[in-house]
Image (cartoon, coloured by chain):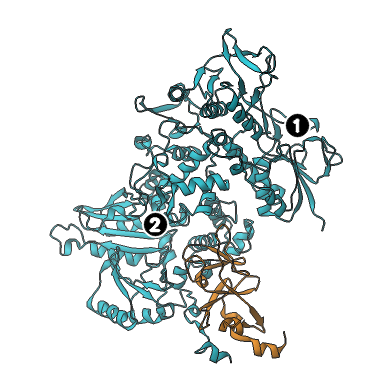
Amino acid sequence: MKKMKLAVIGNGMAGIRTLEELLKLAPELYDITVFGAEPYPNYNRILLSPVLAGEQTVDEIILNGLDWYAENGIRLHLGKTVSRIDRVKRQVITTDGIVEDYDRLLIATGSSPFILPIPGKDLPGVITYRDIHDTECMIEAAKHYRHAVVIGGGLLGLEAANGLKLRGMDVTVIHLAEWLLERQLDPVAAGLLQQSLEAKGLQFRLSTQTSELLANDAGTRVAAVRCQDGSEIPADLVVMAAGIRPNTSLAEAAGLACQRGILVNDTLQTYDPRIYAVGECVSHRGMAYGLVAPLFEQAKVCANHLAFMGIGRYTGSVTSTKLKVTGVDLFSAGAFMGGDGMEEITLSDPVGGVYKKLVLKDDHLVGACLYGDTADGTWYFKLLREGRKIAELRDTLMFGENNIGDVGHEGHNKAMAMADTDEVCGCNGISKGTIVKAIQEQGLFTLEDVRKCTKASGSCGSCTGLVEQILMNVLGTDYSDTPTKKALCGCTDHSHDEVRKSIREHHLLSQQEVRQFMEWRTPNGCASCRPALNYYLISTWPHEAADDPQSRFINERAHANIQKDGTYSVVPRMWGGLTNPAELRRIADVAEKFNVPTVKITGGQRIDLLGIRKEDLPAVWKDLDMPSGHAYGKSIRTVKTCVGDEHCRFGTQSSMKMGVDLEKMLFGMYSPHKVKLAVSGCPRNCAEAGIKDVGVIGVDSGWEIYVAGNGGIKTEVAQYLCKVRTDDEVKEYSGAFLQLYREEGWYLERTVHYVSRVGMEVIRQRIVNDAEGRRALFERLLFALRGAPDPWKAQEAAGVDWKQFQSVRLATSAEGALS
Amino acid sequence: MSLVETRETWIAVLALEDIPMLGARVVEGAAIGPVALFRTEDQGVFALRDRCPHKGGPLSQGIVHGHRVTCPLHGWNIELDSGEAVAPDVGCAKRLSVMVKNGQVYLSKAELTGAP
């Protein structure tokens, strides 16, 4: 079949990103032709500032070299300007007469700097700041001239001014508004910024309008700038950075509707359904975006539609700001100026150079403006985009996310303050320098990119916040935040919630049905979505949806924990941490019989036998004759107990009995992630119930129940849920909480993350206040767990793949057997 | 492939149905070490040396999806038909020849014994 033709006008970041996304989805669908007016392959425009500042070179900011175009069979016309689009003949025509046909056309012409219509604007030495050519002009001018004036104190203007200053020029910034970055900062933060830039040697003329550019005596080059108040500033170089205008002339001439940008709908389609547009040239719902993050979101949606997949809508972006000037740390997002019906929380330390303002409206964070300490910018931005209720966080909101307990990165929580050699990711041994280098050299924009390329934050995830900070520091404004809606995995654009909802509402019973119904991109998923789907199916439709062992991680498939050398560990269940001489004898016998190299007491009051060969597992289980400890599963792990009132002179309640009862009730419970409980018999809390998913603490008059604690990566103290009187109530309340988590938690989300996502208020409402709902939850839990088989004993009922333990052996010596 | 040739150069290791769909089985005792046999949904059968190029994890214990397997230890993805790690990871698990005939899976004798 003859391929369709796709023509792309514009070789910049938005257009090429769209192609990259498209090639991922449908590599064979189109014959692709790209027109680029600049003589360079696709480069990272964001990093022009570091090039100007002398921190990087042009070669280093190329994103896709010429070989990339060749490898993907893309025809590239470099240095060619498209002069006309013929929509009737479906052709694109360049100024020098090249004609290309198209079936689909993508317009990504970007924007142009706004040239002030003042006398002298065409003099030599007057330039804009947009592309590699402009950057090179500035670098060249800095070698020969002394005085530079930048018109415009916005992001681009300040970055240009900073770069020119670093290259040795005297720089004055003329700005029309009353304070710098008036679209990104409030006056207080802008004042601090101005002070710190003045300390670097920049000069400012605020509330000043430029009226004319004056030539030198010979009339060969600009020599000065005259302001409206009549004053003159010497200038051998004038950089116009007073805003950008979308490049729409081509589209307008072709009869496409434009209104301060080419009008597109939520699928990035223009008024001609064969023609799409993305990037800075576009006007979407009345907004034109000049930052990379929104462009990339557009690219993803546009590619999906170009690939005829037809899912995904672009509904607009919330953007944040970060200035790429080394040593200046500022961040803003949302409605940072505040206003009617909004509240502000501020922290101001002018001497320390720190200013923070948070803007709230109806229990939501709607804006943030940070200066001097932006470590929490990514966190605030996330809260803002997710629209999470922050009533519970309000007291501590100003102090940021990282004021307690993350481990694994030397106690750092501010990426800016880290040296290049400091370790960011303690799991994979990745230093800050390695991450920065990867972002710059390989053109990374998102957390996912960094994870893929460097592995940083890809294991336990505790350093995610740090990596996001590094991304933001390196890429500045154009850091692409994780989207509000998180796709389950690369196989789909649907979120965990959407998948769960479909399974529930449409009574889907197999993964195949889910993948078909929700239009998965892969035939049988991937290692991320398969275990998730399997869990969602069996937890939503217990006793109805069939478990798929091949969609379980090896530990749950083999019912033991895989170790680094491929052997397994076995942890038999000891209800509530209690055992007896007969069990201990059997464990000792097994350890000797199977030459178990390591026997260890676990943190959950169990005994771990490590180093067992897979083929020995069935025999080990049989000899142990104890229930599976499920120490390998996203499931109920252990209920840890203290001695309690049976022996302890301080004990107020029978914690051992309570623990055993809870553990028996929950036996065989699979959950989004592992679940650990503890029961203490008095507030001295020897069972450490304060860091468990459910912690139960005995008091004289009954039991206190705490939920969503965590002793792992991020130490989180469990939150008080309620106090109950009887043992049965403990079971009902904690069971209902766990069932809620099982029904609504995302796969691999611990209770602490689940509760912080939905809010403790919601949990209290549904478990404590809503008695009927609680009982229904509890009943559903008991129904799901009814007759839960023990995989170590009832293999068939538990659906254990038995053949996996019988390895196929080529008889004795391979040579002998085969001859 | 003629039957005569089969007898001489291929060795029957197990029945196709012994490999679970989207799963794997291990064949022990070859000179090159354990060999993992994978079965994909489109009825493909692939053999790789059961050692992830990253840190030696047993690929046979991973999750099979499409024509790939994800190593159980650190999540590297390996292409079943070439043994190559999926970018950005770099490395290769040795691929072995497989023949499936009448529901029986065969491996190459030469490759198993390590002969040239």
| In this rendering, position of residue A256 left or right of residue A121 | right
Residue tagged 2: A738
On screen, residue A551 above or below A332: below
Residue tagged 1: A257
Q: A12 or A655, which lies in front?
A: A12
Amino acid under disc 1: Ala
Badge 2 element: helix
Specify the chain shown as cyan: A
Mark toward the viewer: 1 or 2: 1
* Pointer 2 chain: A
* Pointer 1 chain: A
Amino acid under disc 2: Leu
| In this rendering, position of residue A161 left or right of residue A298 | left
Residue at screen point 33% across, 49% down: A716
Say yes or no: labels 1 and 2 on the same chain. yes
Q: CA distance from mark 1 to mark 2?
A: 54 Å
Specify the chain shown as orange: B
- Which image quadrant is residue A173 in? top right
Regarding residue A101, the answer to whether it shows in the image is yes
Regarding residue A445, the answer to whether it shows in the image is no
Q: A545 or B72, which lies in front?
A: B72
Coordinates of residue A780 in the picture (x, y in percent): 43, 60
Residue at screen point 66% across, 48% down: A65
Coordinates of residue A619 in the picture (x, y in percent): 39, 82
